[in-house]
Amino acid sequence: MSDLFIRAACMDWDGVRKDSYLWNIPAVAGVDRVDFEKPVTCFVGENGSGKSTLLEAMAVSYGFNPEGGTRNYSFSTFDSHSELNQHMRLVKGPKKARWGYFLRAESFYNVATAEDEYSRGPGGVPQNLHKKSHGESFLVTAQNNFRPGGVYLLDEPEAALSPQRQLTLLREIYVCARAGAQFFLVTHSPILLGIPDAAILSFDDGPIHPVSYEDTDSYQITSLFLSDRKRILHSLLEE
């Protein structure tokens, strides 16, 4: 734990507006502190459970642009992030990260556009992300930015990736984390959730809490479907 760049996220709820939608997110509302103990932490839970809200607040608190990119990115297409970052304090380790990236599936198109614009400057190397497929540009961005000694926050990185490419991303994350990087992932992917020794925090069934890989809905539902596809489809479609 001493090598982690972000050890915890602390929230001061006294400053959050009483009419804020944040109070309507059971997993997050009123939670004062979330501790992190592993180089890779995955956030899991149903849609709308608060995973991305927490990750986004952490990213902005750490100095990243709300729409994604490195900490050097400064642009705004649509201001959609919550106020949670204004009431959050990150507990940091003694070492300072040398690099980092905030990757959001939701706003990646905007980041790709900004990347192309920034790369036209002196010393820039154009990545031509818009000339690649969505999945290719996603993976290239990750591979070009993952470095040892960095902090990476990834919001549904599997969104554009085939199962094979998810395995590629899993390896990239695992190797980089072993070399001293720290990762936070919001994911529904049973493949990415399988990263060895990752901590998994569930946003379902009350406040944020640890859960095992086998107890995640992503694993259980996928496993059930693959092992008994015909019965599941019959039950689902014939009702």
Image (spheres, rainbow, N blue to C red):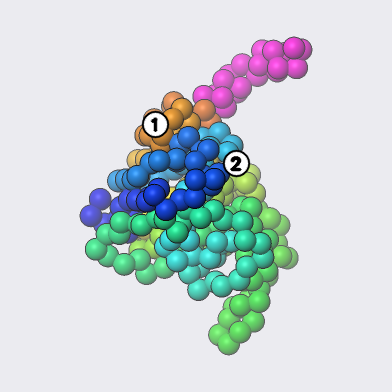
Find the magenta span and give its range.
220-239
Of the numbered discs 1 and 2, the one sitting upstream in the chain is 2
Q: Which mark is residue 163?
A: 2
194 on left or right of 233: left
Q: Of 32 and 177, which appears nearest the observer?
A: 32
Vertical position of residue 125 compared to residue 224: above or below? below
**Please, is residue 22 above or below residue 214 in the view?**
below
Instruction: Give residue 151's position: percent from left, percent from top.
Output: 41, 60
Please tell me in which quadrant of the rendered image residue 89 appears: bottom left
Residue 134 among those drawn in magenta = no
* Magenta stretch: includes residue 223: yes
Label 1, on which residue? 211
Instruction: For residue 190, say whether it is visible.
Output: no
Disc number lying in front (1 or 2): 1
Between 12 and 220, the one nearer to me in the picture: 12
Within 10 Å of disc 1 (Cα), the crowding (few <14, some 14-19, many 20+) is: some
Identified at 45% across, 41% down, the residue is 28
Point out the image quarter for the C terminus: top right
Spot occupied by residue 218 in the image (x, y as percentages of width and height): 53, 31
* Label 1: which secondary element: loop
> Type of residue at label 2?
Pro
The answer to whether one can see residue 80 in this image is: yes
Percent of width and height locating residue 71: 48, 69
User: Farthest residue in the front direction?
Assistant: 18
Against 185, is 125 above or below?
Answer: below
Q: Residue furthest right?
A: 238
